[in-house]
Image (tube, rainbow, N blue to C red):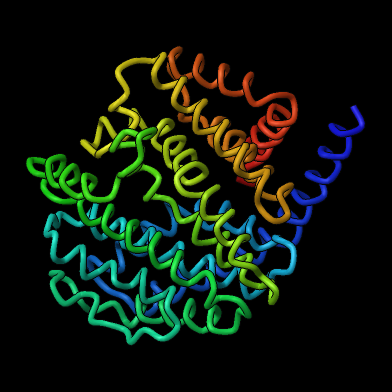
Amino acid sequence: MKTIFYTTTASIKMIRQFLNKVLPLVNQEVNAWQSYAQANMHGELQKQALASISGKRFHCQGGNFYSIYPGVDTEDFIKFIVALQTISDYLDNLCDRAAVTDEAAFRQLHFAMTDALDPEAIQKDYYAQYPFRDDGSYLANLVTTCQTIVKKIPSYGLVKPVILKLATLYSQLQTYKHIDPAVRESAMLAWLKEYNTTEYLTDWEFAAATGSTLGMFMLTAIAYNPELSPAEVTAVETAYFPWICGLHIQLDYFIDQAEDLHNGDLNFVFYYKDEVETVTRLQLFYREAYRQAELTPHNFFTKTIVRGLLALYLSDQKIKTPTEKAIRKDLLHQAGVFTQMLYALCKLLRFKKTL
């Protein structure tokens, strides 16, 4: 009982800090990029930039929980996460909502992700093969913002190779998943055959794990520690990829099933054969994510992230069908009382439109 009380109290303290200090700064930063897009962009690129901000602001908000990680420069890190997540969401819209299916164009666009995470990288012409080009330096400025911040982080050189590996896998996924649906699946399977060497994940689960930015956020956060060790980097990498990243994206796909079916979008949860397999595999991701979180520096923070992912996604109003509600019930039951309390808090915040 004492442990539950301590855990609950510490978590509430973190959540209060997030809601009272971080969230207003996040919204301020997102609004600044929104204003920039309104003032400097035109046509299709402006349309997609504004749509990605209005429709996916939640990604920037949730991702900034990492800005309260111990030792992080909170205000700088908010700028970094907002910029990197905005790049991710903007490029997703350019690949998914602008009636373009060109693999080479998508690959070129996503150099912005890896450049943003490499302070030594020389920026490329990201629109070189895309049909629209004039963005008023929107993408270039987002990349520069990220580069400027990571360059100041004491141990970034230690995490940079792992971050770039994750960013490269992320970029490859986004390239293949948005090409012509007639060839999309076969192209993805050929790509995954080269990279998925695990015996415990299906190709589609491995692909899901590559689609999360959370590992990049966490690795950057721990780099604020000037005495960071290679062992700590490995512990974080192992926890996040594939487990925490996979849990994150499979929960995202789980709540988006109806929307993705309607739009004809790829959804990795569709590859589970039935409800039993869906809940069994999501439970596996949760168990392994939580087990690996125990081994990370400041493990309470990472365990809160794992529990918070369940609370955040399972509180979404997109969960409507009896099958989805049954899976939600099973997952929350497995996760325990503390996660159920976080779930109730997320429901309240959604009701108040804070989330």
Left/right placement of residue 321 relative to residue 314 reads: left
The answer to which image quadrant residue 224 occupies is: bottom right
Q: Is residue 320 above or below residue 127?
A: above
Q: Is residue 56 above or below residue 71?
A: above
Residue found at x 74% / y 69%: 71
Q: Position of residue 251 (x, y in %)?
A: 46, 35
Residue found at x 48% / y 80%: 145
The answer to which image quadrant residue 149 occupies is: bottom right
Left/right placement of residue 216 relative to residue 141 reads: right
Q: Position of residue 265 (x, y in %)?
A: 24, 39
Left/right placement of residue 58 relative to residue 140 reads: right
The answer to which image quadrant residue 303 occupies is: top right
Q: Is residue 158 above or below residue 273?
A: below
Pick the quarter of the image with the C terminus: top right
Pick the quarter of the image with the N terminus: top right
Q: Position of residue 70 (x, y in %)?
A: 74, 63
Q: Nearer the viewer, residue 183 or 320?
A: 183
